[in-house]
Image (cartoon, rainbow, N blue to C red):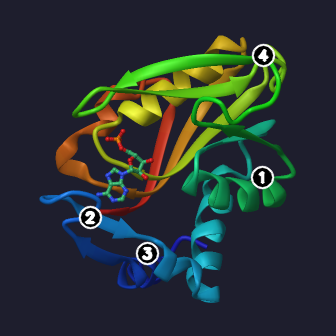
């Protein structure tokens, strides 16, 4: 269900934590939405409505908050769920993609055999900021030979222009925009 009310309702449940994890960052805390049964449902319903007719084979969730929404969405869309994890967490053979952070670099990994070539994939995370994480996640999934057709976020911080880092052929959807 996509109504202005459901978007406003979810927005009203997101909590700002000032100076977390470091000074100057306003952390968007989604645990306050998740604990609310109507809030969590509103997010999943919104995403189901957006993607129900896209014939998605796999949802790739970015560690760790992307797992929460990705798993529920995969269940609803009758798709598989694939975790994109921080280094050293996946037990099997992996592919890796590194990306720049404000200070240093970070890496995401996927099991080499997690997704068959040509399959349609949606990448999901809780929040789109500068877009570095999401861009790396899309590139990582592409390494399997699969096609990333969509990227979904609960929150988008518009001024950081992360959307520009995601290739134009990937439909990018965010529910709550700041
Ligand atoms: P970025 O790569 O800059 O788009 O950052 C996105 C990733 O960092 C996501 O996995 C978010 O969970 C996390 N993140 C970045 N900024 C924030 C923020 N202000 N509040 C909560 N999470 C954030």
How many residues crowd around disc 1 within 10 Å: few (fewer than 14), some, or many (20 or more)? Answer: many
Q: Is residue 17 left or right of residue 2?
A: left
Give the residue displayed 29% in from the left and 59% down from the top: 21
User: Disc 1, disc 2: CB below 8 Å?
Assistant: no
Q: Secondary structure at mark 4?
A: loop
Q: Which residue is mark 2?
A: 20
Q: Which residue is mark 4?
A: 118
Ranked by sequence position, the earlier of labels 4 and 3 is: 3
Residue 149: x and y in percent read 61, 30
* Measured Cα–Cα span from mark 1 to mark 3: 21 Å
Ranked by sequence position, the earlier of labels 4 and 1 is: 1
Q: Secondary structure at mark 3?
A: helix
Which mark lies nearer to you, 4 or 2? 2
Residue 23: x and y in percent read 14, 60
Vertical order, 112 against 19 (above or below): above
Residue 164: x and y in percent read 29, 30
Give the residue displayed 64% in from the left and 23% down from the top: 141
* Measured Cα–Cα span from mark 1 to mark 2: 30 Å
Q: Secondary structure at mark 2?
A: loop
- In the picture, the disc for residue 7 is 3
Vertical order, 161 against 17 (above or below): above
- Label 1, ligand 1: CB separation under 8 Å: no
Ranked by sequence position, the earlier of labels 2 and 3 is: 3
Task: Tell me the quarter of the image containing the C terminus.
Answer: bottom left
Residue 96: x and y in percent read 59, 18
């Amino acid at each position: 269900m996509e109504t202005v009310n459901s978007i406003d309702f979810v927005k009203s449940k997101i909590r700002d934590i000032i100076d977390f994890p470091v000074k100057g960052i306003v952390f968007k805390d989604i645990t306050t939405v998740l604990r609310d049964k109507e809030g969590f449902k509103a997010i999943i319903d919104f995403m189901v409505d957006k993607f129900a007719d896209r014939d998605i084979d796999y949802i790739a969730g970015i560690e760790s908050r992307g797992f929460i929404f990705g798993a529920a969405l995969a269940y609803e869309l009758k798709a598989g769920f694939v975790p994109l994890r921080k280094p050293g967490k996946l037990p099997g053979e992996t592919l890796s993609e590194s990306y720049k952070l404000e200070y240093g670099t970070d890496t995401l990994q996927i099991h080499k055999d997690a997704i068959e070539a040509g399959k349609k994939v949606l990448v999901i995370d809780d929040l789109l900021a500068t877009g570095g994480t999401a861009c790396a996640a899309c590139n990582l999934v592409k390494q399997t030979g699969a096609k990333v057709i969509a990227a979904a976020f609960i929150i988008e911080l518009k001024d950081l222009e992360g959307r520009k880092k995601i290739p134009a052929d990937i439909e990018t959807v965010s529910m709550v925009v700041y």
